[in-house]
Amino acid sequence: MAEQTAIMNTDQCTPATGASKGQEQSSSSASPDIGKPSAATPQTEPSSHAHAHLQAQAVADNDIFAETSEELDQDRLKRIAAAGNAHFHRLGWKRLAIVTIVEAIALGALSLPAAYHTLGMFAGVFLTITLGLIAIFTSWIVGQVKLKFPETASYADAGRLLMGRFGYEVFGAALVLELVMVVGSHALTGSIALGDLNDGRTCSIVFSAVSAIILLILAIPPSFSEVAILGYIDFGSIVAAVGITIIATGIQASESPGGLSGVEWSAWPKDDVTFSQAFVAVSNIIFAFSFAIGQFSFMDEMHTPTDYMKSIWASGFIQIAIYTLTGALCYAFIGPSVKSPALLSAGPLISKIAFGIALPVIFISGSINSTVALRYIHGRMFKNSVNRYIKTPMGWATWIGLVIAFTIVAWVIAEAIPIFSDLLSLASALFVSGFSFWIPAIMWFKLLCPGKWYSKENLPISIGSVVAFIIGAVTLVAGTYSTIVDIIKETNDGSAHSPFACRSS
């Protein structure tokens, strides 16, 4: 009923910013001297009447003690709940910015130079900046929904607001499916990095299994405020790996025949580019701004949720800067021979150094996706139990069990499906296009917009929402088409890898 009431109340746009979910309960403890005889009071033998009175009092005390034992058990549960609630509301806006950056960027930034080669420098830079600004706008909408409906702890809960129980189940399934495949892709990326460091002397399955184990261990901390501490290492790793790649390729370009002016980059799309190839490149840019998928989960841990836009502004502009500089400079330094990821174009030694520095990016960013999915699953399993706070033996046992099961499933899917990379692209076209673009647009019209959408105060946001919806819908249709075309081509060419087979990077 609460959800239905929330859906019907769509004429209020201003969120209740003062909402606070934390509740604390305190109990007073009796002095240890109460009930003890005073040292100054002489003790005498009780009379028979007094003895009977003392026996009755003892029976009453037993009843009181029995009742107190139950109350103490309730107090213990309340203390666990209060401690858990406090533990999961420690995230500030700075740590949230770090979490959203590392959850979205990973090594995706180093795939953009190849996208710029396909689209041309002008279109690549224009799309990166434009799509980044629109992603910031849709994240603002997501945050406003969270402030207006504080009980929305994940994207599945947002689905309930939009479509009731059906929306909750569909959005929850899409969230878990997308994230389990993302974690699997991080296991494969880890195997590529470790294989490059090893010069391919060890079977890739061994390294993907090692990567899965590392992802599993890093996903054990259940709180995003704890994960954010690792996020600082991740962010430093991203900047260092990108910086090394840009500097190394720039030096190589300057020392090549003709110098920097001899690099054959183009402002326009490459010759004979097909629609499918062009849209795969566009999709790489779109999916690079996918931080909205975990935003409800991240904001649910903020101690001051109204500060969320500080995080989004910082995260969004840092991502735009990293993506644009990486894509443009690497493409300008390498030219049409650029590989994906671009660090493979920096030469054997530099690629080893960059991959080694980038290892934290691969594993920490991947583990954050596990945490987002598992917080939804675990919270659903123990919705009305203190075990959801992961402060009890049962809470920890079930949490670690879920982490193990989730990681194993992600690794098996990644290794067993020959066309896993295309399948991940298909899932991203289907789900990320919605989580980041067209679903927030619908949220504005259905959950937030006060009065007429075309009124003077609502029109700018409504126009922005329509643009976001169009981008998401085009990505959904064209991205799905392009991926299916690529799957058919790969299947016909026989270029898909065999399940659980050793393969080169």
Image: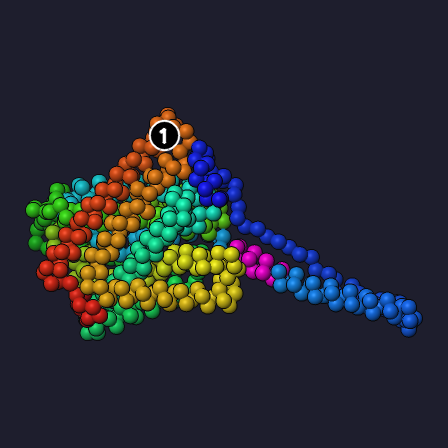
Q: Quadrant of the C terminus?
A: bottom left
Q: Nearer the viewer, residue 335 or 81?
A: 81
Image coordinates of residue 235 in percent, x first then y, are 34, 55
**Does the image show residue 175?**
no
Q: In this picture, is 87 found above or below 149?
A: below
Q: Is residue 55 visible?
A: yes
Q: Is residue 475 above or below residue 67?
A: above
- Assess whether residue 367 is covered by the magenta stretch: no
Q: Which of 251 and 237 lies nearest the eye of the viewer?
A: 237
In this view, 13 is above or below 66: above
Q: Which residue is mark 1?
A: 453
Residue drawn at point x = 30 percent, y = 46 percent: 434
Q: Quadrant of residue 46?
A: bottom right
**Residue, x 32% and y 47% (percent of image)?**
435
Residue furthest to the top in view is 456
Q: How many marks?
A: 1
Q: Residues within 10 Å of mark 1 (few under 14, many from 20)?
A: some
Counting from the top left corner in percent of width and height, residue 244 is at: 24, 57
Q: Is residue 410 above or below residue 135?
A: below
Magenta-tinted stretch: 75-87
* Magenta residues, dominant SS class: helix
**Is 117 in front, or is 68?**
68
Q: Quadrant of residue 26?
A: bottom right
Q: Is residue 86 magenta?
A: yes
